[in-house]
Amino acid sequence: MSDWRKGDLGLVRTPLAFLYADPGEDAFPQTDDVLSGWAVSATDDEDRGWIPIRTHYGYSGWIRTEALRRTNREELIARAGTIRRVSGNWADLYAAPKVQGKLLTTLPRGSFVNIVKDDREGWSLIRDAAGNEGWVHTMALGLRQDGDGYLLTDSGPAWFQENASEKIQCRSETEIREAVAETALSYLGAPYRWGGKTPGGIDCSGLAFMSHMENGILIYRDAQIRPEYPIRKIPREQLGKGDLIFFPGHVAVCIGEGRYVHATAWKHTPWVTVNSLNPQDPDYREDLADKLEACGSLF
């Protein structure tokens, strides 16, 4: 069977797949990066090599058929025990456990792979979503903390709130705040790219999303607060480390004391950088501070 039908489940088989608002060769703009090993569900039938899909974090759009391979509920459930996340900025997949081995592919940070054989003197044998088996540096892998539950349940958007509550209960508020802020800062210097979510190119909501996803919590992947997702509006006076700051069409991650990290297309800093809401700070951005719309928090 070649044609995809509404309800079919798939995994991204390419290192990176682009999600578009509309199908076709002239589709523009790209709205999202969907990474290798991430699960999607077809929301309608395939249309001339394009599939309308919803991701495991509830984001919708069109993706090329060639970027996907079919999966099913059973595989999504079974793979949970062996899944790993690429935690280094990039992971080279080699045919042998040595840097002189044949390079099979390169996977970006955030990709999901399955462990075949654990650590062998600093190397792990993994299988990617395309079926390639090869060796990566063990230090380039970490545990996956989020899940595909939204595609496997009938709870719909409520799942995001339930998932966040479970993750928050497992750790202290301070730990989560520190982790989100540190993850956002780890993308410093990554170039700005509309729709991006990797160190090779990332946008403002992509940075906010990845900072939470890498810590197990799925938020809406856009510069807005959505009631079915776990971020809720708070007064500016309560803004703390790890919270989100919303400007018109823009979002940043607070790192404490009025400072924030964000992916910006501003001509002076077209990359992930740190700025401040405090007028006395040298990196104060008056153009943003004057337009602050809202603050949001998990807590």
Image (cartoon, rainbow, N blue to C red):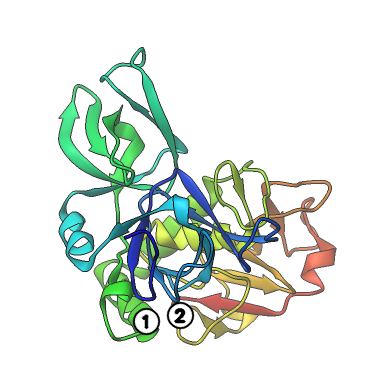
Q: Secondary structure at mark 2?
A: loop
- The image quadrant that residue 104 belongs to is top left
Q: Quadrant of the C terminus?
A: bottom left
Question: Which residue is the site of mark 1?
Answer: 161
- Tags 1 and 2 touching, CB below 8 Å: yes
Numbered disc total: 2
Side of 297 relative to 81 (left or right): right
Residue 210 in the image: above or below residue 121: below
Query: Where does residue 144 sit, x and y in percent of width and height?
Result: 30, 54
Report whether residue 256 is seen.
Answer: no
Amino acid type at circle 2 is Tyr
Residue at x-position 22% and y-position 32%? 125
Residue at x-position 51% and y-position 45%? 186
Q: Secondary structure at mark 1?
A: helix
Query: Where does residue 157 sit, x and y in percent of width and height?
Result: 40, 84
Side of 73 relative to 297 (left or right): left
Q: Quadrant of the N terminus?
A: bottom left
Q: Looking at the picture, tell me which residue is in the foreground, 200 or 285.
A: 200
Question: Which residue is the site of mark 2?
Answer: 229
Query: Where does residue 192 sit, x and y in percent of width and height?
Result: 68, 49
Residue at x-position 45% and y-position 76%? 44
Query: Where does residue 51 sit, x and y in percent of width and height?
Result: 48, 65
Q: Looking at the picture, tell me which residue is in the foreground, 266 or 115.
A: 115
